[in-house]
């Protein structure tokens, strides 16, 4: 990501590799090949203090806030341990002050959470607690993996607005992982479209949403609920699988070739690489080579 703070969306349907990529970036899952480079350091070679430094710099907010917290532990314990062990604040009063200031950023307070267990919060409240826990370390990057998909629709905009406010106030960048292009458009600066573990398109969110290049991106956009059902039906019908879906390991060419209405023999034989279309746009599709 660039030096300036930004919100980068990684979008795609379930099984496209979005969450796997997030786990690799966070250091939870070692890649079979390639590297994760952060500030010129290989994340999987960090040890000791450098590893703690990375945990402070890069934090996560997950899809299900109720799975992120042990139901048998009080919420305060999580915030206390993060502040003491990772942030490095020792004095109890200083720890509580830091926790309270951070909770206020997401519209909560220490008084509201102290002594309570996860089940005593609503989904929206607990997700805000999860965001506060990530903010305790003053991270430069937050990986947000489907952070609003399990939140009531009426509350999703509140969470997204918190992310935008954090980006502006604290120069924190986000990698926002989602299957929902409507929320991606609301919050993002840039977007990467993934399909079956491969990047098929990337570029500024405005450009990609206005004029998608890859057929799969077009399908995703046409899947967003809009009044014109006839228009949507054209692409949805064209993208339906005929018979059994081809096993992924058998696909030698473009991974979208078995669903694409524009598929050719070349698409089936050879896998396209990402190529630049202009200064800010890239696509992996033989239609543009």
Image: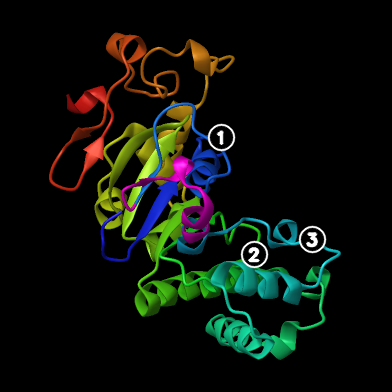
- Pick the residue in front: 277 or 241: 277
Above or below: residue 257 compared with residue 205: above
Mark nearer the viewer, 3 or 2: 3
Q: Is residue 210 found left or right of 231 in the rendered image?
A: left
Q: Is residue 49 found left or right of 7 in the rendered image?
A: right
**Circle 3 is placed at which residue position?**
70
Lower sequence index among marks 1 and 2: 1
**Circle 1 is placed at which residue position?**
15
Q: Is residue 178 found left or right of 151 in the rendered image?
A: left
Q: Is residue 23 magenta?
A: no
Residue 279 screen position, x and y as percent: 13, 46
Residue 152 screen position, x and y as percent: 65, 67
Give the residue drawn at x 35%, y 72%: 171
Q: Secondary structure at mark 2?
A: loop
Q: Which residues are magenta?
A: 39-53
Quarter occupied by the C terminus: top left
Residue 142 screen position, x and y as percent: 47, 61
Give the residue drawn at x 52%, y 22%: 241
- Mark 2 neighbour class, 10 Å CA radius: few under 14, some 14 to 19, many 20 or more: many
Q: Is residue 52 magenta?
A: yes
Question: Magenta span: helix, strand or loop, mainly?
Answer: helix
């Amino acid at each position: 990501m660039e030096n300036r703070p930004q919100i980068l969306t990684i979008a795609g349907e379930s099984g496209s590799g979005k969450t796997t990529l997030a786990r690799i970036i966070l250091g939870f899952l070692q890649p079979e090949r390639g590297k994760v480079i952060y500030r010129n350091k290989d994340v999987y070679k960090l040890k000791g203090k450098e590893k703690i430094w990375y945990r402070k710099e890069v934090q996560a907010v997950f899809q299900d806030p109720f799975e992120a917290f042990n139901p048998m532990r009080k919420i305060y314990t999580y915030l206390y341990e993060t502040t003491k062990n990772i942030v490095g604040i020792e004095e109890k009063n200083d720890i509580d002050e830091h926790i309270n200031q951070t909770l206020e950023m997401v519209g909560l307070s220490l008084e509201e959470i102290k002594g309570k267990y996860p089940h005593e919060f609503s989904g929206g409240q607990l997700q805000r607690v999860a965001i506060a826990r990530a903010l305790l370390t003053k991270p430069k990057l937050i990986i947000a993996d489907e952070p609003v998909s399990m939140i009531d629709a009426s509350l999703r905009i509140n969470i997204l607005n918190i992310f935008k406010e954090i980006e502006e106030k604290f120069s924190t960048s986000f990698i926002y992982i989602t299957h929902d292009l409507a929320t991606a458009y609301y919050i993002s600066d840039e977007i990467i479209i993934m399909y079956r573990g491969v990047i098929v398109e990337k570029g500024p969110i405005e450009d990609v949403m206005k004029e998608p290049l890859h057929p799969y991106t077009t399908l995703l956009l046409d899947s967003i609920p809009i009044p014109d059902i006839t228009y949507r039906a054209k692409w949805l019908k064209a993208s339906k699988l005929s018979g059994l879906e081809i096993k992924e390991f058998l696909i030698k060419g473009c991974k979208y070739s078995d669903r694409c209405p524009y598929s050719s023999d070349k698409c089936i034989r050879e896998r396209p690489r990402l190529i630049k279309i202009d200064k800010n746009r890239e696509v992996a599709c033989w239609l543009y080579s």
